[in-house]
Amino acid sequence: MRAEALKGHLDGLLLATLEHGPQHGYAVKEALCDATGGRLDLPTGTVYPALHRLERAGLIKGSWSVVGGRRRRTYELTEQGRRSLAGARDHWQEFAAVMSAALGGGPWPATN
Amino acid sequence: MRAEALKGHLDGLLLATLEHGPQHGYAVKEALCDATGGRLDLPTGTVYPALHRLERAGLIKGSWSVVGGRRRRTYELTEQGRRSLAGARDHWQEFAAVMSAALGGGPWPATN
DNA sequence: CTCCAATACGTAGGAACGCTACATGTAGCA
DNA sequence: TGCTACATGTAGCGTTCCTACGTATTGGAG
């Protein structure tokens, strides 16, 4: 998967992962990997800065804890984050429609 | 549409537009605008550098001409460009599948 | 005749993003 | 002892698209 392809779409993925409940960064990364059958195995250098960015933006809220001797920062969606996730889903629909219209080769990936 | 969303996906769109036949830059921009119902109205400062990039990469081939007193650079797909377009479509399918799997809220945009 | 929009090309500079590479530290197993 | 998995973090880089210009022609509105 091309690196640039993800740009602008990562935030939505992270928010969507946190929608299932509070998670720490490493768990988010693993959850995304699992949800996509290993096709989206993000480097930690991508995940952590993105989470920091989301927290600065007020879309998620983090809190430190220690589990099994390891420190964790657990994040959960804020109300604003929930709204942003809904917006991200809308934007994705829009973007996918535009891409499919312009890229051609079958409007929607049929059954795939 | 968020600016970042397009990153990494523009090349495929340009190649797909040129698949219908040779076009000059401005016409490509207009064609994309039309194909998407005006939802993708790219600035020329995005289109021209992208075409230059594709030409440098050997995916398209340009040639100058003059029509109605205006100089035009008409581009057409190279064989390599055709292969790259096929790859771009595959990558888009893959990417869209990953996004839908992780973003949730209905695997495919249903009937939309 | 003048002005402006549309057509048609171009570049410079900036902002944003994700990745690579590295650093730190714990737990657990061979 | 050494390695892997877990868990977090930052600095710097490369790519990409956008904004804001600049140039030039054609043709229509006023």
Image: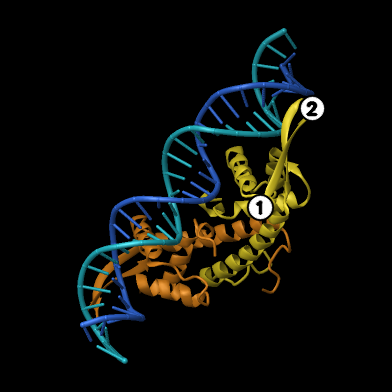
Chain colours: A orange, B yellow, C cyan, D blue
The local secondary structure at tag 1 comes to helix
Task: Give the amino acid at mark 2.
Answer: Gly
**To which chain does the residue with label 1 belong?**
B
Give the residue at mark 1.
Answer: B13
The local secondary structure at tag 2 comes to loop
Tell me where residue A100 appears, x and y as whole percent: 67, 59
- Choose between D8 and A21: the one closer to the eye: D8
Task: Give the amino acid at mark 1.
Answer: Leu
Mark 1, Cα crowd under 10 Å, few <14 / some 14-19 / many 20+, is: many
- Mark pair 2, 1: CA separation: 28 Å
- Choose between B73 and B95: the one closer to the eye: B73
Q: Residue at x 78, y 48 (%)?
A: B21
- Choose between A67 and A6: the one closer to the eye: A6
Tell me where residue B26 appears, x and y as whole percent: 69, 38
Vertical comparison of B28 with A96: above or below:
above
- Choose between A52 and B58: the one closer to the eye: B58
Please identify the quadrant where the C terminus of chain B is shown: bottom right
Q: Is residue B31 left or right of residue D8?
A: right
Tell me where residue B73 appears, x and y as whole percent: 71, 36
Q: Earlier in the sequence, mark 2 or mark 1?
A: 1
Give the residue at mark 2.
Answer: B68
* Number of numbered discs overlaid on the protein picture: 2
Kindly indicate the quadrant of the structure image that contains residue A63: bottom left
Q: Residue at x 52, y 68 (%)?
A: B103
